[in-house]
Image (tube, rainbow, N blue to C red):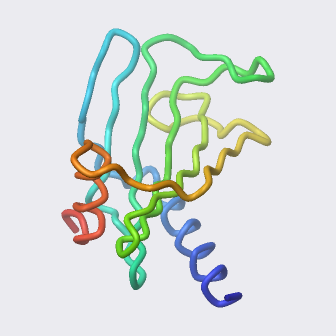
Amino acid sequence: MFKRKKSLLLLSLLALSPLSNAEWTLTATSGVLDAYVDFKDVVLDGNFAKSKRLVDYRKEQKSEKGEIYWSSISIFTYDCTKKLQQVERFRYTGRMGGGERLQDDFFKSDWEKVVAGTPNDNYMVRACGGGDG
């Protein structure tokens, strides 16, 4: 069990480290935000896959503590066998994941079932297939 946790922690660090090297593909846009995904930097480990998504806001946002941020990056970990996902989110003071990461800002969801036929299901299938890398 410890080995699996250590492996997942290493995958998280690897997935977060090359944010500036991400190849963002625009997936959705609105008057409020632009959403991107990076399928070039998918990390595979056995039955697990990690991929990144970015939200770039058109107007400044405020955290619960009143800190201003302009973008957030989410790391999606997929259990490709059980069709589950877990999300970690980090918010940044700059656009496109630039600037400083908000201090003490960390969100990690519980494992959740990925609903078949949704856009997120498509992301999971693509990530579990190795992305475009």
| Quarter holding residue 65 | top right
x, y percent for residue 36: 32, 38
Q: What residue lies at 29% left-to-right and 63% top-to-bottom?
A: 127
Residue 67 located left or right of residue 36:
right
Q: What residue lies at 22% left-to-right and 68% top-to-bottom?
A: 133
> Is residue 34 placed above or below 74 in the rendered structure?
above
x, y percent for residue 16: 53, 58
> Is residue 110 placed above or below 70 in the rendered structure?
below
Q: What residue lies at 43% left-to-right and 50% top-to-bottom?
A: 20
Q: Nearer the viewer, residue 117 or 46?
A: 117
Q: Nearer the viewer, residue 52 or 3?
A: 3
Residue 73 located left or right of residue 52:
right
> Is residue 9 placed above or below 38 in the rendered structure?
below
x, y percent for residue 102: 70, 36
Pick the quarter of the image with the N terminus. bottom right
Residue 45 located left or right of residue 106:
left
Q: Total marks drawn?
A: 0
Q: What residue lies at 44% left-to-right and 56% top-to-bottom?
A: 113
| Quarter holding residue 129 | bottom left
| Quarter holding residue 69 | top right
